[in-house]
Image (cartoon, rainbow, N blue to C red):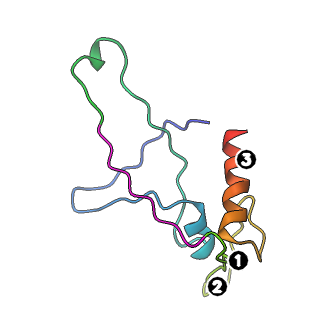
């Protein structure tokens, strides 16, 4: 699935793609953003390069993902595929199977 909407932010901001485990652990305070890089094609692609510097951060594979305390009164936020008591590795495998199977 490729969503072609763009996230916008101003020059005085920094944006991070935090991923769904951060959404789970923050109880929805941080929001995961589906994303897909689509390169330019045809004439407009001539002379254009896309450079990436990816830094991946993740908890320990066997770390139990615990949701933050709900202070809003709205209850726990549901994230597709997550069940309380799962560790990061189990959740990651579910997400990989969902996106790449």
Query: Would residue 36 appear left or right of 87 to someone viewing this image?
Result: left
Q: Which mark is residue 70?
A: 2
Mark 1 residue crowding within 10 angstroms, few (<14) / some (14–19) / many (20+)? some
Q: Which of marks 3 and 2 is in front?
A: 3
Identify the image quadrant of residue 60.
Answer: bottom right
Spatial distance from mark 3 to mark 2, Cα to Cα? 29 Å
Q: Which residue is drawn at 59% across and 70% down?
A: 28
In this orientation, which residue lies closer to the viewer: 94 or 77?
Answer: 94
Q: Distance between the residues labelled 1 and 2?
A: 6 Å
Q: Where is residue 3 in the image (x, y as percent from the top left)?
A: 54, 38
- The mark that comes first in sequence, 3 or 2, is 2
Disc on the earlier residue, 3 or 1: 1
Mark 3 sits on what residue? Answer: 97
Crowdedness of circle 3 by 10 Å Cα count: few (<14), some, many (20+)?
Answer: few
Q: What stretch is highlighted in magenta?
A: 51-60
Tags 3 and 2 touching, CB below 8 Å: no
Does dot 2 land on a helix, a strand or a loop? loop
- Which of discs 3 and 1 lies nearer the camera? The answer is 3
| Mark 1 in CB contact with mark 2 (< 8 angstroms) | yes
Of label 1 and label 2, which has the lower sequence position? 2
Q: Where is residue 23 in the image (x, y as percent from the top left)?
A: 58, 67
């Amino acid at each position: 699935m490729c969503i072609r909407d763009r996230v916008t932010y101003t020059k005085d901001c920094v944006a991070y793609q935090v991923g769904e485990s951060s959404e789970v652990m923050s109880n929805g305070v941080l929001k995961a953003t589906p994303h897909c890089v689509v390169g330019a094609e045809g004439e407009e692609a001539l002379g254009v390069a896309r450079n990436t510097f990816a830094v991946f951060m993740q908890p320990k594979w066997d770390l139990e993902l615990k949701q933050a305390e709900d202070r809003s009164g709205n209850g726990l936020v549901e994230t597709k595929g997550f069940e309380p008591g799962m560790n990061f590795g189990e959740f990651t495998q579910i997400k990989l199977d969902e996106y790449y199977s």
